[in-house]
Amino acid sequence: MEDNYNNDQFGFELKRALLEDTPLPDADKAFMQFKKNIGVKESRWKTLRPYLAVAMAACIAALCYLVLPLGEEDKMASSRMQQQLAKMGDVVYMAGEEKNVISLCVDGKMIDLAANSRSSKSGFVLTSDNVIRMFDVPKDNHDEAVITVPHGQMATIMLDDSTKVTLNAGSTFAFPCHFDKDGFRKVKLQGEGYFEVKYDEQHPFVVNGKQLDVTVLGTVFDVRNFDQEQARVALLQGKVNVEVAKQQTILEPGQVATVGTTGFVTVEDADLEQVLGWKNGLFYFDGQSLHEIMLEMGRWYNMSIVFASSLHIDERLHFSMERTASAEEAIRQLQLICSAKIQIKQKQNTILVK
């Protein structure tokens, strides 16, 4: 969703209401290093250049054959898997292909958080309390950083302004290394994040999502903005302004705003225990549908979800379990209380609901 805010537009009424990738390798450089490593001397090997050229061309062709088609092969394999699962029923969630590590990309460069230390030049470090923090980053550095959280994990990051953000599994979060001191504090979220925003009346904090924008001055709230789900914002402290298609809604503590399929926003009292279950390490469902529950489990365990029958898809359930449990144990416990038959198909990395 495009940013709709600037300092002139942020009116007095709203202020008063709120008051609170890895770069591609350099082929020439790589080839020079290759020559250096094998000790090639120009004068000694002058007569062999034609043969070397042929050999190098053959190597490059072989590499292109082996490496370049991989992306297409992956797509074809994914397509074949989708077709295979579609024969089983309605595919409501597809497992992703990813490394099981939290990734951080700054200005297009990947940072290995696991190997980082304070002597690193990256400016980011994963501290002993498992929080990603910045250090020694020049104040005029406004490069965009993007953190991606894999399935089955969570991540916490401390931003430039001391705002703390905890991210749920399957989330992607973009933010500047340092906020512009003359404007808004803007970040982007795809997924779910729990925000503890540092108060700053002069610099409103804006979360841009695919379906909504959230503006605050300093408060605590949760934003859920996954694909295939209705977006929602739940407020714990302070006030927030939720904007959807130019429709603005101000929330009070304990309220949740949900974006309907038509873009209409509904506000109601929030079940904060359910909203924050993920942050507390729990699967916590209080009257959610089997469809919603299976989506959450598929995202956490990175398993495809297929409904062979829609008979029980809207069944409302009350279910709680530690997220440290295995997929097998979680499904076993869920099976005890629901009418549907749930099976794990290990070969297809799929949970089948009948």
Image (spheres, helix red, strand yellow):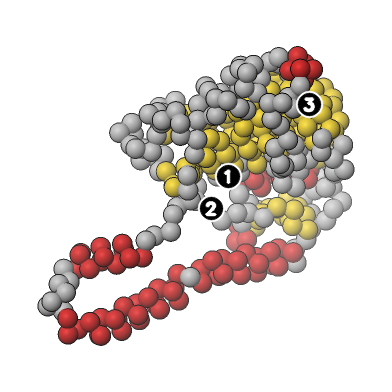
In the rendered structure, are the residues bearing label 3 and label 1 in contact, judged by CB atoms less than 8 Å apart? Answer: no
Q: Amino acid at mark 1?
A: His
Q: Quadrant of the N terminus?
A: top right
Q: Position of residue 327 (x, y in %)?
A: 61, 45
Dot 3 or dot 1: first in sequence order is 1
Dot 3 or dot 2: first in sequence order is 2
Crowding around mark 2 (Cα neighbors within 10 Å: few <14, some 14 to 19, many 20+) is few
**Is residue 256 visible from the viewing direction of this image?**
yes
Camera-nearest residue between 224 and 316: 224
Q: Amino acid at mark 3?
A: Val
Which residue lies most toward the left here? 44
191 in relation to 52, above or below: above
Secondary structure of the residue carrying numbered label 3: strand
Dot 2 or dot 1: first in sequence order is 2
Secondary structure of the residue carrying numbered label 2: loop
Which residue does the numbered mark 3 point to in the structure image?
256
Q: Position of residue 220 (x, y in %)?
A: 65, 21
- Picture quadrant where residue 219 is located: top right
Which residue does the numbered mark 1 point to in the structure image?
151
Q: Amino acid at mark 2?
A: Glu
In the rendered structure, are the residues bearing label 2 and label 1 in contact, judged by CB atoms less than 8 Å apart? Answer: yes
Q: Kindly identify the residue that appears in the image at 34 percent across and 34 percent down.
A: 117
Which residue does the numbered mark 2 point to in the structure image?
98
Camera-nearest residue between 165 and 162: 162
Camera-nearest residue between 94 and 172: 172
